[in-house]
Image: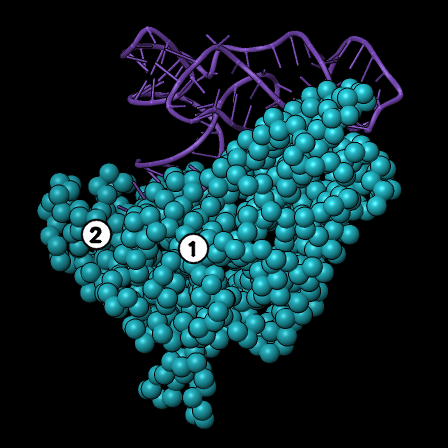
RNA sequence: GGGCGGUUAGCUCAGUUGGUAGAGCGACUGAUUUACACUCAGUAGGCCGCGGGUUCAAGUCCUGCACCGCCCACCA
């Protein structure tokens, strides 16, 4: 071949829009993302399961950051010779998805899910999710993500659905899953329960009412729940109430007339708050519910599922709580029971973060996972889920990075209560429990005629908890499961540490007796240049696809990596992305310069200028060490500066004279060194900037491998 | 109320085990028609949030405080 001219493809400047789609096609054709096809995988397995994006929409910069980070880890390990698997998927995100589709349908057709019926709604949701999946896959590919699409999984596909059923039944049989009447977070808008973790507290200003309750003054923001309050509770050491005794009954005038109230003394009461006396509403407050259980009090609902007052409300029966409050306050005022009103009371209101409404605690029969019950694990030992979750991190079997999140994780575990897993929505994994008269049966298969299945579905995080192994074929004993589990790293945003990371540890502990991953790497949230969350309403969303079109995927990736320390939020602006576009062009032109030199394709390695190559190898070592320590920001920064400031600005500049000189030996030695350094730089850059490095690689006169994607990482 | 993180150049951030303050972007001055104007050389710009302490030496370690942000918690 004729190496003296740079191939025609090296038009200037670098044109990512033309090159990137070609590289994508090249990678896809090769099949190298599937570890079974790797030419040199001699180092054991390296696996990451992609946190599956929700099928509710499109990718945002947070996804892009996740894809960039994981792809760097994956490409690096693949080049180092590990049998590398990066497994893609999608999450059904039950509540969020159903809420979105229901809202869309209502906007367009003014129909609710009850108008459509269960089957029709599920059909509509399926239509939506299929479309959504296709969009997301397309976007994911454009980022250059070297995922093994042949192993793509969806939480609702047959295999994963089966795994969820199996997991439920095993946990049920072990006594870990039980049904009980307990106070849960009820969302009157979506008509379903939600878990403690899905609640978002929103600060809000409401009037705070001080009411006369017999001889006591009690405070409340919610007079409409007070109809059934027959107990007044105070601290036993509170001197103000020393003359009252525990269990003493008093007569008093209340909203709908005279009632008998019972005095309870409990040390849980905060004497310094308000008057130090409070009444309790067991059916609509988690704390009060616990007190009621402690003292064996009756629990009478005041509000129904839709927020309507029940019979106990007397003349207010049938009113919606929103409207009732003012009328009830007026009634109380007429009776002279309102002592005073604080109009500027700030407090937290619980809302459903998955697009729902204001949470109303309700007592309901639901399914729960017991976190404090000691059960037999696969290793034969008895322990609770909580104990397992704590011990695997404490012992170092799972390492969480940055380390500070370990403390947060422990704190969460310590406060953890039984996990309510049943949801009253239709989209999701249906609970595999069947009823026939008084009989109950939990089984994967339909037990036959006469049995009726529980209508509820499972919390979306139940299926997510199985993700590292359900995607690898569990409950079957597959080769994939054996090879790739536990996975090497779980990489995700710190905002789902509890939702997901903790649940995966829980699930794989009980079902497999193993950890789901050895390392947890948490990245920060991507924010706008002012540090605000990106949101539609603020109009500050930077769309990954737009950035790719304007500046290239390589630039988008680098902008999310450099300067992003683990666990720290990333402030992203367009300027940042633009800067890295220039760098991609720099790489392109360095290659052009080196490859244009006539002797480049012919020289022998033995003749090269070793000192310069050693310098590049030292950089390779530094980059490798940084990646091994999950400091991708440092790794990227190191190679960036070596390539631009040292290799391009100094080495190439001083080489110009040598390459034009008369000394043939010096020429070929230098040319060999430049070529060698170029190869090292391309390889070091490849995990960070896969497109431009692959595009250059394709122009090399001689290649050690057909794609840089499977080239060997510099031996360090 | 408890916990965590942040505070370093105009902006965004590095700064590993203490040893003369760094990068990118932006600003300004200039150069070259070049591998690359998506270039190069250079300049300006810092009480390293504030106060105390340890040390020969502190952006870095300890200790108070302030402000910003986040997470958790049943304060009715």
Q: Secondary structure at mark 2?
A: strand
* Residue located 61% across and 26% down the image: A611
* Pair 1/2: label in front: 1
Looking at the rendered structure, whether the residues under marks 1 and 2 are on a common chain is answered as yes
Tell me if I can see residue A72 in this picture.
Answer: no
User: In this orientation, which residue lies closer to the viewer: A659 or A205?
Assistant: A659
Looking at the image, which is closer to me, A543 or A585? A585
Q: Quadrant of residue A581?
A: top right
Residue, x 53% and y 35% (percent of image)?
A: A621
Residue, far bottom: A449
Report in which chain the residue with disc 2 lies: A
Residue highlighted by disc 2: A233
Q: Nearer the viewer, residue A450 or A246?
A: A450
Instruction: Give the percent coordinates (x, y) of residue A3.
Output: 82, 40
Q: Which mark is residue A712?
A: none
Quadrant of residue B58 in the image? top left
Mark 1–mark 2 CB contact (< 8 Å):
no
Left or right of A662? Residue A181 is left
Residue at the (31%, 65%) spot, across then down:
A370
Instruction: Identify by letter the chain in purple.
Output: B
Label 2: how many residues lie within 10 Å, few (<14), some (14-19) or many (20+)?
A: many
Q: Secondary structure at mark 1?
A: strand
Which of disc 2 and disc 1 is earlier in sequence? 2
Residue A216 drawn at (x, y percent):
23, 47
- Whether A378 is drawn above or below B54: the answer is below
- Residue A8: tell me if it is visible: yes
Horizontal side of A705 relative to A467 (left or right) equals: right
Judge whether A566 appears above or below A648 on screen.
Answer: below
Please identify which colour was used for chain A in the image.
Answer: cyan
Dot 1 corresponds to which residue?
A517
């Amino acid at each position: 071949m004729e190496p003296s001219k740079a191939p025609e493809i090296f038009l200037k400047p670098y044109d990512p829009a033309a090159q990137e789609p070609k590289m994508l096609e090249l990678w896809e054709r090769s099949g190298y993302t599937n570890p079974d096809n790797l030419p040199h995988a001699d180092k054991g397995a390296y696996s990451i399961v992609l946190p599956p994006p929700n099928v509710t929409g499109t990718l945002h910069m947070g996804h892009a950051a996740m894809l960039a980070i994981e792809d760097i880890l994956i490409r690096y390990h693949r080049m180092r010779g590990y049998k590398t698997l990066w497994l893609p998927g999608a999450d059904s995100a039950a509540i969020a998805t159903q809420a979105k589709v229901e809202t869309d349908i209502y906007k367009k057709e003014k129909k609710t899910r009850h108008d459509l019926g269960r089957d029709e709604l599920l059909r509509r949701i399926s239509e939506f999710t299929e479309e959504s999946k296709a969009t997301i896959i397309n976007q994911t590919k454009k980022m250059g993500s070297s995922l093994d699409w042949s192993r793509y999984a969806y939480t609702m596909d047959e295999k994963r659905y089966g795994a969820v059923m199996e997991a439920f039944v095993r946990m049920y049989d072990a006594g870990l899953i039980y049904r009980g009447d307990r106070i849960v977070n009820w969302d009157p808008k979506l008509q379903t329960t939600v878990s403690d973790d899905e609640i978002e507290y929103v600060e809000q200003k409401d009037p705070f009412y001080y009411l006369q309750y017999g001889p006591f003054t009690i405070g409340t923001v919610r007079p409409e729940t007070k109809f059934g309050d027959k107990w007044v509770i105070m601290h036993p050491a509170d001197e103000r109430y020393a003359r009252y005794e525990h269990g003493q009954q008093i007569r008093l005038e209340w909203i709908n007339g005279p009632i008998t109230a019972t005095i309870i003394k409990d040390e849980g009461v905060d004497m310094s708050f308000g008057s130090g006396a409070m009444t309790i509403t067991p059916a609509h407050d988690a704390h009060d519910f616990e007190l009621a259980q402690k003292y064996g009090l009756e629990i009478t609902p005041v509000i129904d599922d839709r927020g309507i007052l029940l019979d106990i409300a007397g003349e207010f029966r049938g009113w919606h709580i929103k409207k009732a409050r003012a009328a009830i306050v007026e009634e109380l005022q007429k009776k002279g029971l309102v002592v005073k009103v604080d109009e500027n009371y700030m407090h937290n209101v619980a809302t459903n973060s998955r697009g729902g409404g204001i949470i109303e605690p309700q007592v309901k029969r639901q399914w729960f996972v017991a976190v404090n019950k000691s059960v037999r694990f696969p290793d034969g030992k008895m322990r609770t889920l909580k104990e397992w979750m704590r011990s695997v991190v404490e012992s170092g079997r799972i390492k969480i990075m940055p380390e500070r999140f370990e403390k947060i994780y422990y704190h969460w575990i310590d406060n953890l209560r039984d996990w309510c897993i049943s949801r009253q929505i239709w989209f999701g994994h249906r609970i595999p429990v069947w009823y026939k008269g008084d009989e109950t049966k939990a089984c994967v298969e339909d037990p036959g005629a006469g049995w009726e299945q529980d209508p509820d579905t499972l919390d979306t995080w139940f299926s997510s908890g199985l993700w590292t192994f359900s995607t690898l074929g569990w409950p079957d004993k597959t080769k994939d499961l054996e090879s790739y589990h536990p996975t090497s790293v779980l990489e995700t945003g710190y905002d789902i540490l509890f939702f997901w990371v903790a649940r995966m540890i829980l699930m794989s502990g009980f079902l497999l007796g193993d950890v789901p991953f050895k390392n947890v790497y948490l990245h920060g949230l991507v924010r706008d240049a002012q540090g605000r969350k990106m949101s539609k309403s603020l109009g500050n969303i930077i769309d990954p696809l737009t950035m790719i079109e304007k500046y290239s995927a390589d630039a988008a990736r680098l902008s999310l990596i450099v300067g992003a320390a683990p666990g720290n939020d990333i402030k992203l602006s367009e300027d940042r992305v633009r800067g890295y576009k220039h760098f991609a062009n720099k790489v392109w032109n360095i290659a052009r310069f080196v490859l244009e030199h006539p002797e480049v394709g012919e020289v022998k390695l033995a003749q090269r200028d070793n000192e310069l190559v050693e310098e590049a190898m030292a950089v390779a070592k530094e980059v490798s060490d940084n990646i091994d320590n999950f400091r991708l920001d440092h790794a990227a920064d190191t190679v960036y500066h070596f390539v631009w400031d040292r290799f391009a600005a100094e080495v190439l500049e001083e080489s110009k004279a040598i390459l034009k000189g008369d000394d043939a030996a010096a020429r070929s030695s230098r040319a060999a060194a430049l070529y060698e350094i170029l190869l090292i730089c391309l390889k070091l850059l490849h995990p960070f900037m896969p497109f431009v490095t692959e595009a250059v690689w394709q122009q090399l006169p001689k290649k050690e491998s057909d794609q840089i994607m499977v080239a060997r990482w510099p031996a360090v």
